Image (cartoon, coloured by chain):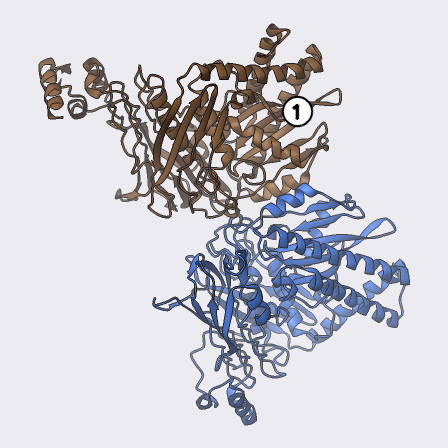
Amino acid sequence: MIHVRDPIRLELLKNAFAAIADEMAATVVRTARSFVIKEAMDFSTGLLDAHGNMIAQGLCLPVHMGSFPPTIATVLERFKGQIRPGDVYALNDPYVGGGLHLPDIFVFKPIFYEDKLLAFAAAIGHHTDIGGRVAGGNACDNTEIFQEGLRIPPLRLIEGGRMNESVYEILRLNVRVPDKVIGDLNATIAACTRGERGMQALARKYGQDVLIADMNHLLDYTEVLTREEFRSLADGTWEFEDFLDDDGFSDDPIRIFARITKKGTDLTVDFTGTSKQVKGSINLPISMTQSCVYACIHSIVDPNLPTTSGFMRPIRVIAEPGTIVYPICPAPVAARGLTAMRVTEAIWGALAMMLPDKVFACGAQGDFGVTIAGYDSERRPFVLLEFLFGTWGGRPRKDANDGLSSLAVNYANTPVEMVEREQPVRIEEYGFRQDSCGAGKFRGGLGMIREYRLVGVDEAVLQVRSDRQKFRPYGLMGGQSGAHAANYLRAKNGKQSVLPGKFMRTFLRGESYRAVLAGGGGWGDPFSRDPELVLQDVIDEKISIEAAKKEYGVVIDLATSEINMVATKQQRQRSNAAE
Amino acid sequence: MAAPVDPITVSVIQHRLLAIVEEMGEAMLRTSYSQILNSSRDFSTAICDLKGRLIAQAEHVPIHVGALPWAARSVSDFFAGDIHKGDVFLLNDPYHGGNHLPDLTAFVPIFADGKPLYWSINRAHQSDIGGATHGGYNAAATEIWQEGIRIPPLRLYERSKIRRDVMDMIAANVRHPRDFRGDLEAMIGSTHIGERRMLALAAEFGWPITLAAIEAVLDGAERQTRAVIARWKDGVYKGEAILDDDGHKFKDVHIRATVTKAGSSLKIDLSDSHKQVIGFINSSFPNMRSACAVALSYLIDPHTPKNDGTFRPLEVIAKPGTVVWANEGAAVTLATSHCAQEIMEAIIKALAPACPDRAMAGWGRRFRIAISGKDPRNGRKFIWHLFEARPGGGATSAGDGWPGAGEWNGAGGVKFGSLEVTEVRFPLFFRRHECRTDSGGDGQYRGGPGGSLELVVETAEPALGNTAGDGVRYGACGILGGEDGLPHRYILRSGKRRPRTIKTKEVGIVIRPGDVFNIESGGGGGWGNPAKRKKEARDRDVKNGFVKAKRAQPRRPRRRLHASGSR
């Protein structure tokens, strides 16, 4: 047990840290330039103590959570004894820096108070472009990291308040849209400065020693709370496997296998049995694999549990080097976000075995990454990068939310108007996809459809990272899987052709690309679904009359839009008997 | 105003300058790690002043040197007022004074009385520069971001202290960081030797005399060049060269030069060249200027030093957005070979009738393979560049073209790697390496034969190959009635599969263990009417195996792919 002399103050400081981290996040949103960061909010902020332990995370991406400690560790090691006020450190490399993939640039600003290193303010931004073979930095068909863009090892971006012009210039030249990237990078630095001021204000108010002591207390306190949570769960081992369709090179499915062992107050997630690393760029760096674990476990505990390194202490992650969840340099990793989705889904699957009344069925998460890039008539480069968020799976007590980002990533969507204003594309359709939801007592969420037509330029490059064309999002407790995802290309003459899950191709003026997202899995037996809810879904055109009958055994009278109770009863009995 | 210096001192200093840049080169050759540098010598050394005037260059890779003034200017401008003793600067970006990304350039300032006056410069072709493909040549590239890491003018050492994080960042972006660091240190060492020797020179003669002598050296080179040009016939001449393709949708990409010769001046107008293309044969501005300077160098007295004065009689006109001067962002990696060679070809073809005794027929085009794989003998990864089976040199009024002398842009400056060393260092076996019969273009003077090579790849697992080059449709140009050399022909034989012809711009060629390459490189172009070739020369060709017996007589000219001279 820990002994805190002033628990009230600890509580106040805990909330102050979290508030500072949130304020940092707000600074990023208000000062960033790209869609990815200011609209889709693909970034994170956090505060770390002087040893690199996380003491607060901004309300951003849960899967970024676990990645600050391993990355700051590489900075601390590299710059040991040389960290000075006014410095800002940066990195993006997954192998020498512990990073996530090259477009995610981490920045760390040491916070000094009275010449003593107090803490670090940290931020990650997912940048619109990082150079490399394919604009947008998320190509699936890279085969080594050198193709994926600029690798940034831990380095000093700003030294004692003076910008390292060389690094800035290299960055400026090596990305396609330097104004956006440098602007966004500076937004993350501004956020760190915000964090620095906040922490310095706290140090002034409470004194430096108190602050440092309470940061330690907070870590211990979080650990204690986490262990208490774990203690209340049953001991045991639970397993789950899910699959990725392929890596874009071969057709082999890729197995993600998670075994969760809970014993006493410790919890282990073991990925042994997961497929080997692949040729294509969907390998998931180990720091992100760990982050996925923390994000998933955090989703089943008390939401008020602080997001600090203390939470990570009772959790152990086991993965074999050379597997897709722990690739070895120089394996490509650009499109690893897809694998992160599947890893979280495998972990949630195992957690569902452990806590059947708590965990949702599988959603269709952030599998889709779409990049449309090229040059306008004046040869200025443009890059449209969007991660289409999917939909949730059915919940133990409720239907899924339709069209909502995965719990793991908390994306927002980019408004159609913004896209059309800034990019040479027209969004021809954006909406829900009827009948895509997995049937269940509580049905899965509807997938989305988004169709892009190239209108402003003659030619662009279209690159898509997607999955779930073969393996559908799973249902739970008798719920059905959600519908498959699909990709289509519509030629100028209207002729439609099918595209694979992962591809890169030339995109011509007048052509349109149609992203059809998978639906979420259902939870529970669909025949036990309240027929009134089924009727409402039909009225809302979320499901068709045919699906109501076939999937739910609910017969609806077309003319009156009412439930034919007799026919429904017969239908449900007949179907049950048939089984 | 500089004081006049006696001509003996000027000559001594001129040769000292040359000795300095050559010593820089020797140091580089002895200390660099990569084969492309320590064996194939794909690097150049030079001294420029801060205004970017070329003071002296070693005779290494011509195409590097003509571009260095722009690089020097770029660094001088970027760091104006902020250059200190002990600083080392770097750049490679073709839109900031570089040729193409693999050519990394290091600069060390040389100070006189506390003021930076000169740059000691080393430009070296790195064996890898990151990007989509190993070895830097990405035939699939459609923009520069796919070609490697772009390095703007930057400071690597600040007052003798390395900026380690900048170094680490660059090294993290190349595939062989150990070799890369070794090569870069060799470059920096070589530039420091240049600095030291220049300071010693100044210490010996004093700065005032040294400076005045340097001006006299430049003026002398200008005088000599003008004297040569003045002897040619005035007029407006046109020449055209054509590239096979850009590896994407463009075929028959033309470069057209209109050269106006008046008195002792030349004006080269390239405006009528093909518009910018998609693939990596676009040229950056410095590379295009360099190609023009090289063309002129090939036409003047070989003993004239190549410096700023040499190129003063030259005016160049070109249009942005054309293949010879691409807009920022275009892919350019192959341009130091192609289209640089075609720029030279168009200019030399144009001027051939004006100075037939100086004009040289075309040298074979570049067609290189880079293989990346794993050496089964030690489990290490390797990247190998084909520098063997060099194409033939072009014929001149002085005689036949050199056999296997390489491409025009290097004109013999780039050596082919030793077969024995290559076999020791790479899992490769050279079954045959010889001159390719009948490949040189016929003429009064025959083009040099290309090479014929049979290469076995002895890896245990599949390796990957990329190619970069041109000239499987267009051979090296003959001039003044000489015939074109034979184009290249590369064939890959893989087990029982059908042999296939390798294209000049391919990425991701799968090379299986035991695969055999049959490489036949193009010959040089011929000079002058074949009917005028002496019988003894033809007999000698047969005896040497350069020409088959039945062909050892003048033939009816083949259909000419190129036309030379005025049109």
The letter of the blue chain is B
In percent of the image, x 46 and y 90: which residue is there? Answer: B549
**Above or below, comparing residue B479 to residue A100 in the picture:** below
**Which residue is at the front of the view, A108 or A188?**
A108
Residue B369 in picture, x, y percent from top left: 50, 63
Residue A354 figure quarter = top left
* The N terminus of chain B lies in quadrant: bottom right
**Horizontally, is A238 left or right of B476 in the view?**
left
In percent of the image, x 74 and y 72: which residue is there? Answer: B304
**Above or below, comparing residue B235 to residue B205 in the picture:** below
**Horizontally, is A544 left or right of B516 in the view?**
left
Q: Is residue A389 among what the camera can see? A: no
Label 1 packing within 10 angstroms: few (<14), some (14-19), many (20+): many
**Which residue was labeled with disc 1?**
A50
Q: Is residue B31 among what the camera can see? A: yes
The letter of the brown chain is A
Residue A269 figure quarter = top left
Mark 1: amino acid: Ala
Residue B173 in picture, x, y percent from top left: 58, 47
Dot 1: element: loop
